[in-house]
Image (tube, rainbow, N blue to C red):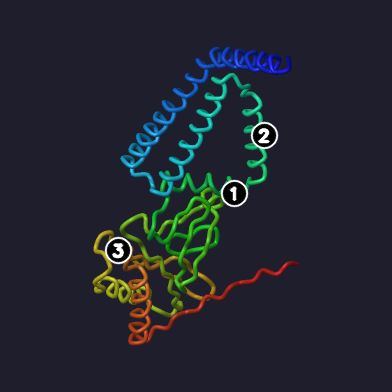
Amino acid sequence: MKLAAEIGFVEQYTTSFIKVLVDYSPKLVAAVLLLFVGIWVIRVINKITRKIMVQREIEPTLIKFLSDIIFWGLRIVLFIAVISKLGIESTSFVAILGAAGLAVGLSLQGSLSNFAGGMLIILFKPFKLGDAIEAQGASGTVIDIQIFVTQLLTGNNQVIFVPNGALSNGTIINYSKEENRRTDLTLGISYETNIKTAKDIITKIMLEHPKVLKLPEASVSVKELTDSGIKLAIRAWTKNDDFGDVTSAILENCKMAFDEAGIFFQPFVKENSKGS
């Protein structure tokens, strides 16, 4: 009697299982097909987007990062689609993902700002590796552009890490953007000095320097008349790579030529305004 009851229970359970399997099999098959087709489509999309970004000469760092975002984003969408196909309620999963995204966004506001700034820098390229720039109170040569920070190497061999958020929202001076660069020097002479003589000496020095460009022409002009003396503005164009050497050479040659001509540099006196 007991054995017959157990056999009947097994038969009933088997019948129910087969019925559920038959009813559920179309959804299971559709979900499996969707999974494999989705994985293949994701690979194709990822490959195509990488190819397009490479053709548009986007930075390799950004290509890898965007490709990873697209890859995992599409996988999450595929996962939700598959469980929906199986008849599992996906609303809760979407709500959990949304809440998790909001929490991460609030906790990483500063990092997300730097991330967005890094993407803007890589996309719009206000500077590139090897450029000499000045930004956020720091100046140096760009040695690395990362997603969150940009690394500058200073003249005294120090590495400065500048957050990309502040860098992309601030003023950037790129000294390497153009091929040529102009020196802007100021020399002071006394009122007793013959201005034409001083200008001729400086002009001759610039014209004879091999690294000073002929065009645009170098110039010397009176910049300002102060209580302590006359300010002369010296402007000479040179190749960007020669800027430091040319600036130093002009100052050095002017000093030696002025000494030979008996001309003395006039120091400028800063007037400190005193409050009444």
The label shown at residue 111 is: 1
Question: What is the secondary structure assignment of the residue under circle 1?
Answer: helix
Would you identify the image quadrant in which residue 44 lies? top left
Q: Residues within 10 Å of mark 1 (few under 14, many from 20)?
A: some
Amino acid type of the residue that numbered disc 3 sits on in the rendered structure? Lys
Q: Residues within 10 Å of mark 2 (few under 14, many from 20)?
A: few
- Mark 2 / mark 3, whichever is N-terminal: 2
Give the residue at x 70% y 70%.
274
Which corner quadrant holds the C terminus?
bottom right
- Residue 94 is situated, as x and y percent measured from the top left of the image, at 62, 28
Count of number-bearing discs:
3
Q: Which residue is mark 3?
A: 239
Would you identify the image quadrant in which residue 265 lies? bottom left
Amino acid type of the residue that numbered disc 1 sits on in the rendered structure? Ser
What residue occupies the far front of the structure in this picture? 1
Would you identify the image quadrant in which residue 136 lies? bottom right
Left/right placement of residue 222 relative to residue 117 reads: left
Assess whether mark 3 and mark 2 are in contact (beta carbons under 8 angstroms): no
Question: What is the secondary structure assignment of the residue under circle 2?
Answer: helix
Amino acid type of the residue that numbered disc 2 sits on in the rendered structure? Ala
The label shown at residue 99 is: 2
Question: What is the secondary structure assignment of the residue under circle 3?
Answer: strand
Q: Distance between the Cα atoms at labels 2 and 3?
A: 55 Å
- Mark 1 / mark 3, whichever is N-terminal: 1
- Mark 2 / mark 1, whichever is N-terminal: 2
